[in-house]
Amino acid sequence: MNDKVAPNLLGTIEDDELDEPIPAMQQLLDNPFLLLFIGVAMPTVLYVIWGVMEIVSIPMAK
Amino acid sequence: MSAIEPPVERIWWKQPLDRVEGTWIVIAFVWCIVMFVMMPYWHIYGKQNLSNEAYRTTAEAYLKKATESAEKTTVRTETDLKIPVVHPAPGGDAYLVARLWQWWPMLELEEGKTYRIHLASMDFLHGFSLQPENINIQVHPGYEHIVTVTPTRAGTYSIICNEYCGINHHTMASKLYVVK
Amino acid sequence: MINRNFRTDPATGLVFHETAEKLIRANAVAAVVSLLVGGILAFFVIMTRWPAVHLLPADWFYLVLTAHGVDMLVLWIIFFEIAVLYFAGCVLLKCRLAAPKWAWTGFWLMVIGGIMNNVAVFRGDSSVMFTSYVPMGAHPAFYLGLILFAVGALIGCFVFLGSLVVAKSEKTYNGSLPLVTFGAVVACIIAVFTIASGAIILIPTFLWSVGLIPTIDSLMYKTVWWAFGHSSQQINVSAHVAIWYAIAAIVFGAKPMSEKVSRGAFLLYIFFLQLASAHHLLSDPGLTSNWKIFNTSYAMYLAVLASMVHGLTVPGAIEVAQRQKGYNRGLFEWLRKAPWGNPVFSGMFISLVGFGFLGGISGVMMGTEQLNLIIHNTIYVPGHFHATVVVGTTLAFMAMTYFLIPTLFRREIMFPKLAKWQPYLFGLGMSGFALFMMGAGTLGVPRRHWDMTFAGNPLGYEFAGTAYLMMGLTAICGLIAIIGGGAYLLITVGSVFFGKKIDVPEYRTLTLREGAAPRPVRQPVAVAIGAHHGNIGIAGFVAPGTFTLAMVFLVAFVLYYFVNWKYLSTVWPLS
Ligand code: HEM
Ligand SMILES: [Cu+2]
Ligand SMILES: [Cu+2]
């Protein structure tokens, strides 16, 4: 699929590409391990920890 | 080139939104907010909300309360098992015990009156399923859940179990009477 | 010695690493075997729930239902997902598989765990359903099997992540991951959370079953269990969405309408999708409405938004690709001229439509805090999830298999005529099955219930005649789906073992330098899709047909949603 492209292996980066920095959001989306951290932290805090705290704070019946 | 190859552009995040996508995102987002708002809205203006009132309890403590209450309010017994039918005072408390494989006792309520119904299981999870109203509430062991209900139509209702609770799960059924 | 044997598939240009290929095959085969077992069990389940037939005795019914749940939802789906991860990782990135020994260890742990769990169930003392709510206890092997399986799957996830690192360091691709691989990353992230939650709850439960822990709180169990049980459904969603994009790319050469929108939608999945586990606890005591509303709505339905976006961008990308090929007339020429006889496409498209219209709408409806009261634990629930995990995920996986058999197994598809019909039989049968189950659930018919007639029980409830009709129709549609599933098994097993071999170049060893991706001619910044080809579409909309379908979907959604509020408003007041 890429075969027809000139094979300048590991080649130099064209100048125009260096001009603009990669936007922060794109960097985030390109970082699987940061995403992994977020994807585990969010439900752990919002679902599991919050839920468990509510359960342990249920009062005793009279 | 395509979704199975890396994007050809070095920076794709700055691609302007296409009109089809942009319009749809706005419409879908509005709909999402509407759906979200419906839940708090119903808590304020709607009449059917599941109570948050629950307590930690034990099977013994709960059974004791339920038995004492039933002794005071039993009006008759039904079936060969002599299951008491209780007629709690309108506005008062009624206790329902869920256990393998029975709902105990049977309740007789008055139409248009409000009751605090207590629910707890003695053993496994059970499912309170009132038919044909189709009101379904999970019943846990170790927790006493108090729901306030107002039956609006007189008649004979059924409570079936709709949480799998073992080999005789499908036999766990009872009646609930609503009288004028 | 690192294995650097690769081969290039001449038909598709895909590059297969030898070890990765073997693992993809092994996982796919294990998946199909699980589907076979689960499918046989499905027959007995549905034949028992058909009131007119009522095939099995009660103890067998509950046993078989437990095994059906485990073998389908856990084994078939997760084995296939590991195959998808390795495919999206190694094949699409043209890279070698990281840590092959670990990958095989993970695979065998999954096999052993799956068998151990099944043995426990078929011994007869573990008919606890796949949810295994405590304090109802199963044989310790039931939990241990699931734990081993989960550990194996977790290893698979890390091998996948490791392969991404390998691809990056060996420069087998440039820039960002392909969108499909990114979708697989999302599935993998969700899987890590899923499996961690499973471990947190199943390990103590196992210890409890052997007597080392005195009690486990049922509410605590149910809450944490669903962080595992429902999140695993979200792995499926991410995985099958990734497959939709892959099939759109494979069949049509479709390019995502915008990487930003599609990846942004996947990001919303990472943030919010897993919160929805809370919809399993909406009718439970003790958890507050704040927790319930926030979590069940995926924080304001932002993950639903993401699914609605994917539901638009996948067919939208197909529409754009078709219009560019010249099918640019009217609203729907692109769709009419789609290859409806190609099971890769038809399976994917039925999966998309069925998942959205049946699974999506019903899921959001019953995941609403108050509406759950009139649905919880009725047979509506299996109706809903057979629309999501069967019509959606399973059918998407089936469609993908038709692509994998020639490329991965290098065999021609046997029974091509049957293959043409298979997605319709299975997809439409299952859709009808799901719809009628939902109908019966609306009438109160309970799930996991051996006898809706309450025969011989003086206190039993007599369901309306329509409820019986619905269950009968459910069964008939279920049988059609089983025939469709059987056709799939026949075609895949037949092709893999007896199909005509396709001759392709064998593996050859690539050096690090040869394996590196050539630097493509890359545009610096992406421009809007319309800017390339301003002359397709209608009124500035490049995909007007898809947009119209999306609006039809929205109208159906809104109507159905409010019909259920109307219905709720008529039941007894509760507070
Ligand atoms: C042709 C195919 C299938 C048929 C006819 C079928 C039929 C059924 C029926 C009748 C039930 C039981 C409902 C009840 O009594 O609660 C059920 C449950 C279930 N099915 Fe299927 N099914 C099929 C395929 C699948 C597939 C492919 C999956 C997963 C990928 C699946 C996953 C499940 C699960 C998880 C349950 C719930 C078990 C439980 O409640 O514990 N099924 N199925
Ligand atoms: Cu029960
Ligand atoms: Cu039960």
Image (tube, rainbow, N blue to C red):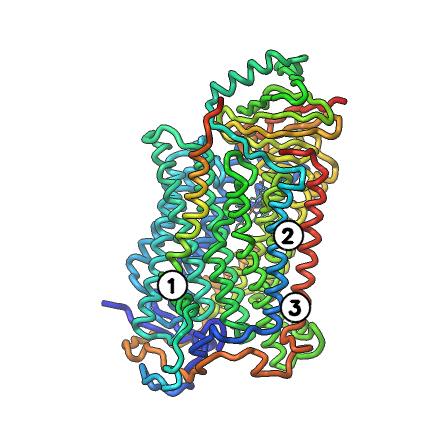
Which residue does the numbered mark 1 point to in the structure image?
Answer: A32
The 10 Å Cα crowd at callout 2, few under 14, some 14 to 19, many 20 or more, is many
**C509 over C451 or under it: above or below:** below
Q: CA distance from mark 2 to mark 1?
A: 42 Å
Q: Position of residue C187 (x, y in %)?
A: 44, 58
Three-letter residue code for mark 2:
Ile
- Return the mark for residue C480: 2
Secondary structure under the numbered disc 1 in the rendered image: helix
Q: Examine the rendering and report whether any part of residue A23 can be seen.
A: yes
Which residue does the numbered mark 3 point to in the structure image?
Answer: C547
Q: Is mark 3 within 8 Å of ligand 1?
A: no
Residue at the limit of the structure toward the front, as seen here: B44
Three-letter residue code for mark 1:
Pro
Q: CA distance from mark 3 to mark 1?
A: 32 Å
Residue under disc 2 on the same chain as residue under disc 1: no
Residue under disc 3 on the same chain as residue under disc 1: no
Three-letter residue code for mark 3:
Phe
Q: Residue A29 is drawn in which quadrant?
A: bottom left
Q: Please give the count of numbered marks on the rendered protein.
A: 3
C443, A21: nearer the viewer:
A21
Secondary structure under the numbered disc 3 in the rendered image: helix
Name the front one of labels 3 and 2.
3
Q: Position of residue C518 (x, y in %)?
A: 36, 82
